[in-house]
Image: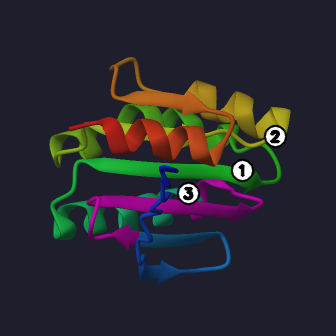
Amino acid sequence: MAIILLAVTQQTIMQSLFKAKNIEISYDPQNKYLYCNWLGFQNKESIVKSGGIILELLQQKGVSKVLNDNSQVTGPWQEAADWTASVWFPQMIESGLQHFAWVFSPNIFSELSAKKAMPSSGIVKSFNSYNDALSWLLLQK
């Protein structure tokens, strides 16, 4: 008698919440996290504006988890790194953020900007792949 194992994949339908030329933000209602897919070149203005939208959506959806994907970011954004660490992350944490999976860009200058922007709290974990980041985030309660 042969035993047959069936692999069941869980297909999640993401809800698109916001799209701009520099970012796409979606929501996973089943796993309750925001997915922020940053696109192309970023500057302080685009990051501050998009950061405000992410903060609003985090509050509206009442989620505590974010998958922040920089894999398509194409250059440095260090002019916004201090603001991200000292203003945006504290606001996000105050609004309920507990787990932040950050996929770094393969662009070394973008990665250096991201490392400078990371808060000292333990809520952020960095990754080099989307799949690793998602796997970690889904394990967080």
The residue singled out by tag 1 in the image is 71
The disc labelled 3 sits on which kind of residue?
Ile
Residue 106, labelled with which disc? 2
Q: Secondary structure at mark 3?
A: helix
Q: Residues within 10 Å of mark 2 (few under 14, many from 20)?
A: some
Q: Residue at x 44, y 58 (%)?
A: 51
Is residue 125 visible in the rendered image? The answer is yes
Does the image show residue 89? no
* Nearer the observer, 54 or 32: 32
| Amino acid found under the numbered disc labelled 2 | Pro
Q: Is residue 49 above or below residue 128?
A: below
The magenta-colored residue range is 27-46
Residue 79 % position (x, y)? 65, 41
Left or right for 25, reference 98: right
Q: Which residue is mark 3?
A: 47
Residue 114's place in the image compared with 2, above or below, is above
> What secondary structure is found at the residue carrying circle 1?
strand
Q: In terms of image quadrants, where is residue 81?
A: top right
- Labels 2 & 1 near each other (Cβ < 8 A): yes
Q: Nearer the viewer, residue 98 or 86?
A: 98
